[in-house]
Amino acid sequence: MKPTTKLSFKFIAVVLLSACSIQMVRGQEAIQSTEAAAMNAGQMSYMVPQKPEDISPLLNGEKIPMATLTDVMGKSFDLNKAVAEKPTILIIYRGGWCPYCSKQLSGLQQAAPELENLGYQLIAISTDAPEGLTRSATKEKLSYTLLSDADLNLSKQLGIAYKAPKGYWEMLPKTTGGKDSDLLLPVPSVFILDKTGTIHFEYINPDFTQRLNPELLKTVAASLQKDLN
């Protein structure tokens, strides 16, 4: 049966409730108290969670941090300047080497025309070095912006970085061009931002095999459209 994009309000409510139920809850008192102590000492340090379930991400209503990343050509890209131009769907994924990420990127490409017609831009960020971004863009025939956060500076500030399992330790220095010295990974995330960089919706799931359905993303994006323009 061909799936329909006209979801009932009841179904949307159920799916959104389900999505919210698997989003990360911020209440990580131990991590936050340690960060507060570091701030009081005049130096903020990122306490690396050891599990994806232990992250403490930014929440709805908060603004993304200032960030300069690298594009597919290896040039500097001012993320905040780009976000200020139009509402943004910001996707954080692990890398083109991840099959679940590749499937997600492909699904986003299919949804991109409709999302762009709604007034959004898509920006996808991963740990990949620029050459890895180029491979993903070519393989999946992507038309939207790909950026490199190879040192996971942005992911740490978003509160979604955690210590990668040992099985990734040999690979990550290679795919990040040696920049992921702390051997971190981001929890795959989707943020919908207004032009000030304020988060209006997020989907963050510690199970990296589970990604936000493109049809649901389009529904949520459409419902937020008037609030963001």
Image (cartoon, grey):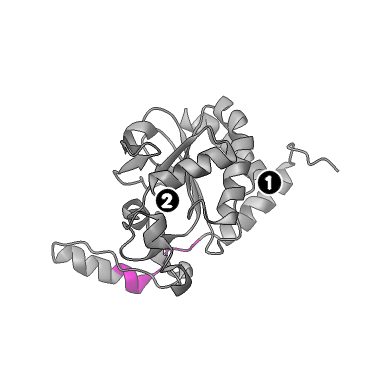
Instruction: Report the magenta residues as a range.
Output: 24-32
Which residue is at a point 58% across and 32% down the rendered structure image?
115
Which residue is at a point 74% across and 41% down the rendered structure image?
8
Q: Which residue is the site of mark 1?
A: 12
* Percent coordinates x, y for residue 103 in the rendering: 62, 49
Could you say which quadrant of the image residue 193 lies in?
Answer: top left
Q: Furthest-left residue in view?
A: 42
At numbered mark 2, what does the secondary structure look like: helix, strand or loop?
loop
Which residue is at a point 36% across and 46% down the rendered structure image?
64
Q: Can you say whether 195 is above or below 170 in the image?
A: above
Instruction: Determine the CA span between mark 1 and mark 2.
Output: 34 Å
Residue type, numbered disc 2: Asp
* Percent coordinates x, y for residue 205 in the rendering: 54, 60
* Percent coordinates x, y for residue 182 in the rendering: 32, 65
Q: Which residue is the site of mark 2?
A: 128
For the residues bearing labels 1 and 2, Cβ distance under 8 angstroms: no
* Percent coordinates x, y for residue 175 in the rendering: 42, 56
Res. 124 in view: no
At numbered mark 1, what does the secondary structure look like: helix, strand or loop?
helix
User: Does residue 104 appear to the left or right of 90 in the view shown?
Assistant: right
- Foreground mark, 1 or 2, reads 2
Q: Quadrant of the N terminus?
A: top right
